[in-house]
Amino acid sequence: MRLLSICFALVLFFLSPLSGQAQQKAGAGIRINHIALYVKDLKASADFYTGVLGLDTIPEPFHDGKHVWLAIGDYAHLHLIAGRSQEPVPGKNSHLCFSSSRLDAMIKTLEARKIHYEDWPGKANTVTRRVDGIRQIYIRDPDGYWVEVNDDFNQ
């Protein structure tokens, strides 16, 4: 009976509406930790995210040659995981997005490496300017995942 009372109390706690203050802070205790991409060629993907986008590698706990972890900002990581055998079918609406204070320099890097970039509609070597003035480009990583890079970077 005591266990039933405890379970009932927990159900009431989790199903009860949040107070006004708790509702305002509902998202305050959560932040993105990592994004994981399942990749075919770990080295090619790691080279792309470090060499083209400039992400830094960070220690990963597995040490098995199947993982590369990269820092994204102060708190988030990008985890590259080797072993994908099927081709992804990513549409442009499903993409990673990075903001850069050096978008023009990145475009020069892409051009020097002969990496295709395009605007939102798909026009090659073109930059989209959103209605809010933010400039953005789209590229594909070695596995075909879409990556947006924009200049919405506040330091």
Image (spheres, grey):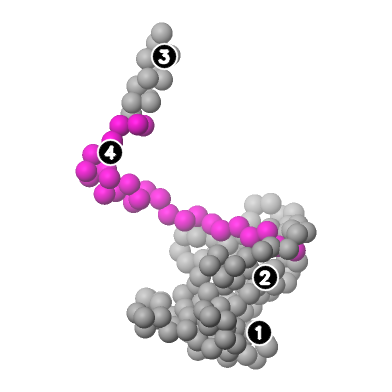
**What distance separates the C-alpha of mark 2 from that of mark 1?**
12 Å
- Element at badge 4? loop
**N-terminal-most mark, 3 or 4:** 3
**N-terminal-most mark, 1 or 3:** 3
CB of mark 3 within 8 Å of CB of mark 4? no
Label 1 neighbour load within 10 Å: few <14, some 14-19, many 20+:
some
**N-terminal-most mark, 2 or 3:** 3
CB of mark 4 within 8 Å of CB of mark 2? no
Residue 18 - label: 4
Q: Number of labelled discs? A: 4
Magenta residue check for 39: yes
Quadrant in the rendering for residue 13: top left
Image side of residue 146 versus residue 11, left or right: right
> What's drawn in magenta, residue-wise?
14-40
Q: In which quarter of the image is the C terminus?
A: bottom left
Residue 114: % across, % down: 68, 88
Extreme left residue here?
20
Identify the residue position indicated by label 2 in the image. 144
Identify the residue position indicated by label 3 in the image. 4
Q: Residue at point 68% right, 63% down?
A: 88
- Type of residue at label 1? Ile
**N-terminal-most mark, 2 or 1:** 1
Camera sees residue 98? yes
**What distance separates the C-alpha of mark 1 from that of mark 3?**
62 Å
Magenta residue check for 76: no
